[in-house]
Image (spheres, helix red, strand yellow):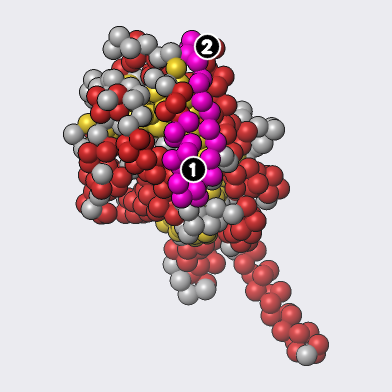
Amino acid sequence: MESDERERRPAALSRRGFVKTMGATAVATALGGAPALVRAQAREVKVGILLPVTGPLALEAQFSQNGLDLAAEEINAAGGIKAMGGAKLVMLKGDTQNKVELGKSEASRLIDQGVSVIIGPFSSLVAFSLRQDMEKARTPLMLLGSVADNLTEGGLKYVFRVQPNGKAMATVTMTNLAEMAKSAGAPLKRVAMMHEDGNFGTTMGNHVEEFAGKLGYQLVQRIPYNLRSPDLTAELSKVKAAKPDVLMISGYYGDGKLIAETAAKLRMGVNALVGLANAAYSNPRFIGENRELTEHLLDGNYWHNPQSPRAKAVFEAYQKKYNTPMASHGVMAYANLLVVKDALERAASGDRDKLRDALAKTNLTDHILPQDAIKFDEAGENVNATPALLQVQNGRPVAVGPARYAESKPVYPVPKWKA
């Protein structure tokens, strides 16, 4: 074997020397091909998608994946990454099952497979565990669905978030809600808060509690719960006894749905049920399956710019492809891949460090979100990220605030919840 290696080595060295001393075009011609053979090395960019495909957050993950797939198909159909010779986006997928250790191992696998960036992982708990891993691997992480404030803290350089973080989500939603209530002649005085007990829900609960002093309402109940709880009747009975003006809920699809259904049976006597980054209350599937229950639910959440022709075209394409309206998580997923595409064009490379530097300099105005340009501060937060205050009206979620993006006037107090 050793003698065979010595016999083969001169030929290999000769070929490397031959390649080194010739230009790219000459090399391609000498090897029997056209210049395209050399360019073929950059004909794809691998994008890692890390979501809880199975487990309690599988439905939310599917909405996100749909938005990513739609964006990837549109980008590839339009010529791919032109600065890289038309390189196509290739999606490599991993499943966290909403488990920290699995999320870490799946991220490591995707990095080993050569992805230029990872989008995900939805759960704030899983996202927090990945932060340092992504820094060590020098691989950009585009947070998708993860709102906890602490995910971008600590001087990180490779973590970016397009969507509003927990503070922005709570600030805008609670301010819009207080202004709406005041305009309706029913000022916000007593608030109850229910939230799932993970990193996400706890973050949102903390903000609602902190805002009580600033906006002048009293937090009369704050109840954490496990998102897998099969029955929340006891918790909602405590809320009802506290007699709040509104009940705020930060949770995922299954638990958010359960709370609304149980609250209806208990006849809560509140002015409104209001989601805060809630995965159910502006979700087309929940609305479609529960028209009477969901009518006039409010939700502070990610959304598109309803005044944007491009956003309208995206929604039409999504409806055509999936035969269902686009959900808020699909909107944010779609926007994330647009940001990655823009950065790849400016970097003209799938190199992780070059892509990271391009992401940091993002100033994207051609997008579908209800905000000005997408740009990141030193912590990786989108400085213009803005949630919308949504309300289900006539079977679909519409923006009722901020005024700049409002499609309709809110119904408040909501008669059926007040009864």
Q: Is residue 418 visible?
A: yes
Q: Which residues are magenta?
A: 214-238
The residue mark sitting in front, 1 or 2, is 2
Location of the N terminus by quadrant is: bottom right
Q: Where residue 259 sits in the image (x, y, percent)?
A: 40, 39
Q: Which residue matches tag 1?
A: 144
Q: Is residue 387 visible?
A: no
The residue shown at (53%, 48%) is: 121
Dot 1 amino acid type: Leu
- Determine which of the numbered discs, if any, sits on residue 395 in the image: none
Location of the C terminus by quadrant is: top left
Q: Which residue matches tag 2?
A: 214
Could you say which quadrant of the image residue 183 lies in?
top left
Graded by Cα atoms within 10 Å as few (under 14), some (14 to 19) or many (20 or more), the crowding at tag 1 reads many
Q: Where residue 44 sits in the image (x, y, percent)?
A: 47, 58
Q: Where residue 14 sits in the image (x, y, percent)?
A: 69, 75
